[in-house]
Amino acid sequence: MKIAVIIVRVLLAAMYLFASVSYFLNLMPKAPEMTAAQTTFMTGLMASVYLFPLIKITELIGGALLLIGRTAPLATLIILPVTVNIFLYHAFLGPKDLPMVGVMLLFNLFLIYAYRAKYLPIVSK
């Protein structure tokens, strides 16, 4: 179980670090063809000016914290809303990449399950 947690943690961190670093360094490949609904959604994100960079900063911080074993329980909680939002975006607007995003969500949920003992003081009296 311990080795599985390390592997999943590093893979999830790599996904988020790659996505955020390539965004900030403008290394992203040309965007694939989007549907009208996807274009509307992305236009709204870009129009808000601050939201997309905030998401990418959250991904960068979460990915870095995942690599540090001591802060991984905190990172899984920080990155969960981003993962759920990415999953829902692909579930409703672009199901082509849904399997990969589903794996990301499963990785995040697996890590939350693996670190459940760390979260007990938060919810216990």
Image: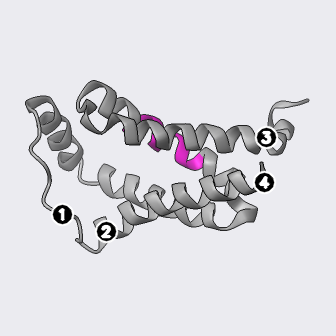
Q: CA distance from mark 2 to mark 1?
A: 9 Å
- Give the magenta range: 78-86
Q: Which residue is mark 3?
A: 119
Q: How many residues crowd around disc 1 within 10 Å: few (fewer than 14), some, or many (20 or more)?
A: few
Residue found farthest to the right? 125
Q: Amino acid at mark 2?
A: Ser
Chain-order first, disc 4 or disc 3: 4
The correct choice, above or below, for 100 with respect to 22 in the image is: above
Residue 50 in the image, given as x and y percentages of width and height: 30, 54
Which of the labelled discs sits on residue 2, or is there none? 4
Nearer-N-terminus badge (4/2): 4
Write down the quadrant of residue 10 in the picture. bottom right
Marks 3/1: CA–CA distance: 38 Å
The one nearer the camera, 39 or 113, is 113
* Tag 4–tag 3 contact (CB < 8 Å): no
- Marks 4 & 1, CB-CB < 8 Å contact: no
The residue wearing badge 1 is 29
Prevailing SS of the magenta stretch: helix
Residue 89: image location, x then y, percent: 31, 33
Q: Quadrant of residue 36?
A: top left
Question: Is residue 62 in sight in this rendering?
Answer: no
Q: Does the CB distance between marks 4 and 2 fall below 8 Å?
A: no
Which image quarter is the C terminus in?
top right
| Residue name at image x 45 percent, y 43 percent | 82
Q: Nearer the viewer, mark 4 or mark 1?
A: 4
Q: Residue 117, percent across and down? A: 84, 41
Q: Which residue has dot 2 on it?
A: 22
Q: Marks 4 and 2, how far apart in space?
A: 30 Å
Above or below — where is 116 with respect to 63?
above
Tag 3: residue type?
Tyr
Q: Is residue 35 magenta?
A: no
Secondary structure under badge 2?
helix
